Amino acid sequence: MKHARVGRWVTAGWALLGASGGMGIGCSSDDPAAEKPPKGELAQVPVGAVEQERIDIGLRISPVPLKLEGLDRNLVGLGSYIVNAQGGCNDCHTQPGYAPGGDPFQGQPEKINTEHFLAGGRPFGPGIVSSNITPDAQGLPGGMTYEHFLAVMRTGREEDGSIIPVMPWPIYAKMRDQDLRAVYEYLRAIPPAQPGMAPPPAP
């Protein structure tokens, strides 16, 4: 099962590739009148105008519906912005990445494969397959607690001490905790899904 564990992180880090250190939340709000969160959502951390723009875009572009109950809407929105507007996570963690007729690389209007969104299953060589990073039965992305997720991003090592190949974890290790937390919270908010099947090899 070593290969399966490696597969979890081969491309997980690509989700964060474009994230900049200045996108974290926690800045003072430009609007002193804070809105009350919808019922069931946590109170939002105040943010400035730049951060709020990223959050709003993130909430708008998520290709799947979000479960926000018990979560901070601002963190989820920022995580969606990092995952969907910068990191290209869909390219590695959704198999196939686009729905039929929705591949922009074929000149078609983009349509994300929402049925298998971030559920893994894409092969990257012998024994290396992208992992399912959607919530498990306990609501943990890929079965990971935040502490586990953060430790892997900071150290590039699995629980057995092995170094994760391919994933550019040395870059993500430099990111702010708040940005990594936002990605984790977004992954908590997306629907659970099962991996898609790899297409048959071309004849």
Image: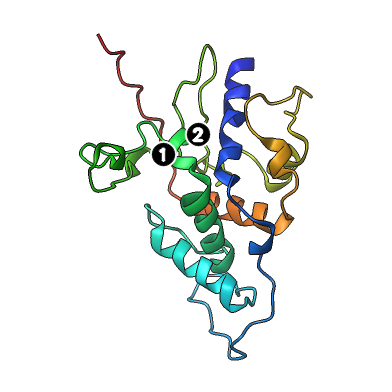
Q: What residue is shown at x 70% (from left), y 41% (from top)?
A: 171
> Residue at horizontal 22%, vertical 43%?
108
Q: Is 44 situated above or below 148?
A: below
Q: Earlier in the sequence, mark 1 or mark 2?
A: 2
Is residue 1 visible in the rendered image? The answer is: no
Q: Is residue 51 left or right of residue 146?
A: left
Residue 59 visible to the viewer = yes
**Circle 1 — which element?**
loop
Residue 82 falls in which quadrant of the image? bottom right
Image quadrant occupied by the N terminus: top right
Residue 69 picture location, percent across and down: 50, 64
Mark pair 1, 2: CA separation: 8 Å
What residue would you read off at disc 1?
A: 193
Looking at the image, do the residues carrying marks 1 and 2 touch, with CB atoms under 8 Å apart? yes
Vertical order, 37 against 170 (above or below): below
Image location (x, y in percent) of residue 21 = 69, 58
Q: Nearer the viewer, residue 142 or 101?
A: 101
Colouring used for the render: rainbow
User: Neighbour class for label 1 at 10 Å: few (<14), some, many (≥20)?
Assistant: some
- Residue drawn 47% across the image and 35% down it: 93
Under mark 1, the amino acid is: Ala
Instruction: Report which residue position mark 2 lands on.
Output: 132
Answer above or below: position of 176 versus 101.
below
Q: Position of residue 103 (x, y in %)?
A: 28, 39
Q: Which mark is residue 5?
A: none
The residue drawn where x is 66% and y is 24% is 165
